[in-house]
Image: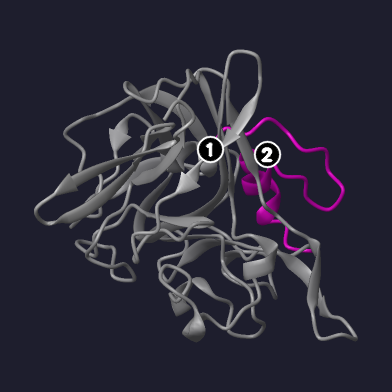
């Protein structure tokens, strides 16, 4: 039939349905620290304003609202593939540590690729947000599908996800210097819903991105550029927990492209486009 959108392939094993109007895509990410590929077994030097030594104990973040962009600027949402582990239809968890070396807060399995489908077409750019969609952000994680059931990615004092969890040990903070990014200034409304005055979901747009050849470089050195990761403001949590009043958050938020306490949002420097390293493990099976 001329207008038939779905092609059926019959085999002796059953019926497989293929949507002839879509194509599978993968968006690859690679973690680095400056010019070095990230490795849980390594300690990195010259980090932040004090040229501190840094090791990492955990390194992961959620991604939502993934879109491909064509040359005319039209955005096409990516239908995320629900794999039962690292992705639902609305959110993906990128996990860059393998639980080895200093990554004592991490897990064995890696996930450095977002997978999904889009309508067939030519795309030249990509957009996405680090975060968890608001309608999912305050649900009970013990009742949610993976990867929204990782309790280590929740704040226990109030329902709400840590959009990014980057835990480190530094020269001046051997017991821990962390970035836990999430929505803050949250209140429970009269109808029982929760709303947050500070969403803290940074959006990233790369106008030129080749799905076949490029990857998104995730750079911890640029994340902490301009930050003193060897000290901690008194009477605040270790590092940055995203709360206003904690000056440790200002340079990190700047590098994420987020405003902080009324500051003007700067151009982000945390992520950039680089060539795909095909030897990098994209996902542990």
Q: What element carries label 1?
A: loop
Of the 4 image quadrants, the one containing the C terminus is bottom left
User: Can you identify the residue that label 1 sits on?
Assistant: 270
Name the image quarter holding residue 146: bottom left
Left or right of 51 in this view: 253? right
Left or right of 76 in this view: 79? left
What x and y, as percent, mark residue 282?
A: 25, 44
Left or right of 107 in this view: 251? right
Residue at (47%, 21%) from the top-left corner?
121
Q: What element carries label 2?
A: loop
What x and y, as percent, mark residue 199?
A: 74, 58
Residue at (83%, 53%) from the top-left corner?
261
Front residue of 37 and 47: 37
Query: Is the Cβ of the residue at disc 1 closer than 8 Å to that at disc 2?
Result: yes
What x and y, as percent, mark residue 200?
A: 70, 55
Magenta-highlighted residues: 245-269
Q: Residues within 10 Å of mark 2 (few under 14, many from 20)?
A: many
Q: How crowded is mark 1: few (under 14 residues within 10 Å), some or many (20 or more)?
A: many
* Residue 257, numbered label: 2
Determine if the magenta segment contains residue 251. Answer: yes
Front residue of 138 and 220: 138
What x and y, as percent, mark residue 119?
A: 49, 31
Check the image and name the residue furthest to the left. Answer: 12
Determine if the magenta segment contains residue 43. Answer: no
* Residue 199, numbered label: none
Structural distance between the alpha carbons of marks 1 and 2: 8 Å
Residue at (38%, 33%) from the top-left corner?
20
């Amino acid at each position: 039939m001329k207008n038939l959108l779905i092609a059926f392939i019959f085999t002796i094993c059953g019926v497989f349905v293929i949507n002839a109007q879509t194509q599978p895509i993968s968006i690859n990410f690679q973690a680095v620290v400056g010019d070095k590929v990230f490795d849980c077994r390594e300690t990195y030097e010259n980090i932040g304003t004090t040229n501190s030594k840094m090791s990492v104990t955990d390194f992961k973040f959620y991604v939502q609202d993934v879109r491909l962009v064509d040359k005319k600027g039209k955005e096409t949402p990516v239908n995320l593939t629900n794999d039962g582990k690292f992705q639902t239809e609305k959110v993906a968890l990128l996990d860059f540590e393998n639980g080895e070396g200093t990554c004592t807060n991490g897990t064995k399995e890696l996930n450095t690729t977002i997978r999904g489908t889009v309508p067939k077409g030519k795309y030249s750019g990509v957009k996405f947000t680090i975060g968890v969609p608001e309608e999912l952000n305050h649900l009970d994680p013990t009742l949610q599908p993976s990867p929204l059931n990782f309790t280590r990615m929740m704040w226990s004092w109030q329902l709400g996800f840590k959009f990014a969890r980057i835990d480190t040990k530094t020269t001046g903070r051997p017991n821990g210097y962390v970035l836990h990014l999430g929505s803050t200034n949250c209140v429970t409304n009269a109808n029982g819903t929760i709303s947050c005055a500070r969403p803290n979901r940074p959006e990233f747009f790369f106008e030129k991105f080749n799905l076949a050849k490029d990857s998104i470089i995730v750079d911890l050195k640029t994340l902490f550029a301009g930050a003193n990761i060897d000290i901690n403001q008194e009477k605040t949590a270790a590092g940055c927990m995203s709360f206003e009043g904690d000056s440790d958050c200002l340079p990190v938020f700047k590098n994420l492209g987020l405003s902080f306490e009324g500051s003007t949002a700067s151009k982000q420097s945390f992520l950039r486009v680089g060539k795909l390293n095909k030897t990098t493990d994209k996902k542990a099976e």
